[in-house]
């Protein structure tokens, strides 16, 4: 087995198992492979893409900005090798777009978000309906548009994000591995529009979409807690709009389900306490509220 294939296999082992030492080994091997693939080598494009693909999750694991900068530089070199009409140009556009979005989230530089949107729009244009990367391109562009809406408040961006997520969902029928993500993304955008414009049908649809997404996550899935949190927030919004006490009770129950040690647990506990505060304000049940606040706030503060 050649070094390029060994490096690719190591990265796939990391993706399937998430063992960080495997990723570190994959990075070292991919660096060695790139050294023996100079400019003009037939495997240079693959080497650049593979190394950048390894360094991005390493950055996400370790948080060093230098790693993200290296991934961006490698992706830019790969893109330069994929001129218009190249078979892999769409994926070579998507990769630097994802890295630029990560840098925007880390540093808040608007130019990175705008660059990510531009690159992803170009990638989407190269992905016809039957293209295997079309769903991921639609989802990514929708997320970038939503980020710009949150930054600048332009409703057109939110409307485009909703349309893109709706298109992505159409390509994710029941059984598709990306269906849960598409449901979650569309629900999140619908809730944002409800909060902005107050159209109750948007909130109702967000609840329905979150319920569908939640059904697709087994109890052991780490993404289940995000779906629980989103649904809880929607139920609390509906209670605040309609005053149905059962919605508040449901929000309380959902916020209690985030397991100990999960990254979303502190925010779930915070949301739970807010729901309990609302319950107290509705019922005046201080004798029930005070122990609950102490119980659920304490671990959030100590986390």
Image: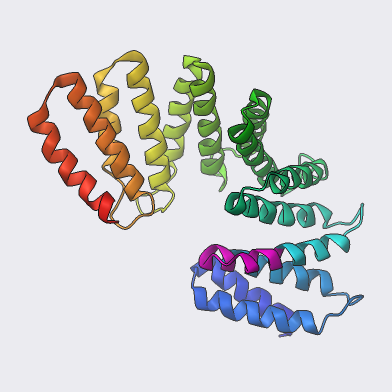
Residue at x 71%, y 49% (from the top left corner): 112
Q: Please, is residue 180 above or below residue 249 in the view?
A: below
| Image point (33%, 49%), residue name | 265
State whether the magenta stretch is mostly helix, strand or loop: helix
Quarter of the picture holding the C terminus: bottom left
140 sits to left or right of 74: left
Q: Position of residue 263 (x, y in %)?
A: 38, 54
**How far across and how far down the image is residue 232, in percent?**
35, 33
125 relative position to 255: left or right: right
Q: Residue at x 64, y 31 (%)?
A: 152
Looking at the image, residue 234 lies above or below residue 86: above
Please report the residue visible at 44 percent of the width from the left and 43 percent of the height from the top: 216
Q: How many marks do you count on the picture?
A: 0
Span shown in magenta: 58-71
12 relative position to 217: left or right: right
Assess whether residue 70 is covered by the magenta stretch. yes
Q: Nearer the viewer, residue 240 or 51?
A: 240
From what the image shows, is residue 236 above or below residue 67? above
Q: Along the line of sight, which residue is nearer the eye, 96 or 136?
A: 96
Quadrant containing the N terminus is: bottom right
Rendered location of residue 149, percent (x, y):
62, 32
Is 192 contained in the magenta span? no
Figure colour scheme: rainbow
Q: Foreground: 171 or 289?
A: 289
The image quarter containing residue 261 is bottom left
């Amino acid at each position: 087995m050649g070094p390029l294939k060994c490096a690719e296999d190591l990265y796939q082992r990391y993706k399937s198992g998430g063992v960080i030492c495997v990723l570190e080994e994959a990075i070292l091997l991919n660096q060695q492979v790139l050294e023996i693939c100079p400019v003009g080598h037939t495997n240079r494009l693959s080497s650049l893409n593979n190394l950048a693909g390894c360094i991005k999750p390493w950055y996400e694991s370790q948080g060093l900005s230098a790693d993200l900068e290296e991934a961006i530089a490698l992706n830019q070199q790969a893109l330069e090798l994929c001129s218009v009409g190249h078979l892999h140009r769409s994926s070579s556009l998507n990769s630097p777009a994802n890295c630029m979005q990560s840098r925007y989230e880390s540093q808040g530089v608007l130019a990175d978000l705008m660059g990510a949107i531009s690159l992803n729009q170009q990638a989407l244009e190269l992905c016809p309906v039957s293209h295997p990367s079309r769903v991921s391109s639609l989802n990514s562009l929708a997320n970038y548009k939503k980020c710009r809406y949150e930054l600048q408040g332009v409703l057109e961006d939110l409307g485009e994000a909703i349309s893109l997520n709706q298109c992505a969902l159409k390509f994710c029928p029941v059984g598709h591995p990306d269906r849960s993500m598409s449901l979650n993304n569309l629900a999140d955008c619908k809730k944002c529009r409800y909060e902005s414009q107050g159209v109750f049908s948007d909130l109702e649809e967000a609840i329905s979409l979150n319920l569908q997404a939640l059904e697709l996550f087994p109890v052991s899935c780490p993404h289940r807690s995000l779906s629980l949190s989103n649904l809880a927030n929607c139920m609390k919004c509906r209670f605040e709009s309609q005053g149905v006490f059962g919605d508040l009770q449901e929000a309380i129950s959902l916020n209690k389900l985030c397991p100990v040690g999960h990254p979303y647990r502190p925010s779930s506990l915070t949301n739970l306490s807010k729901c309990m505060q609302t319950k107290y304000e509705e019922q005046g049940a201080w004798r029930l509220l005070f122990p609950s606040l102490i119980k659920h706030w304490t671990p959030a503060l100590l986390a």
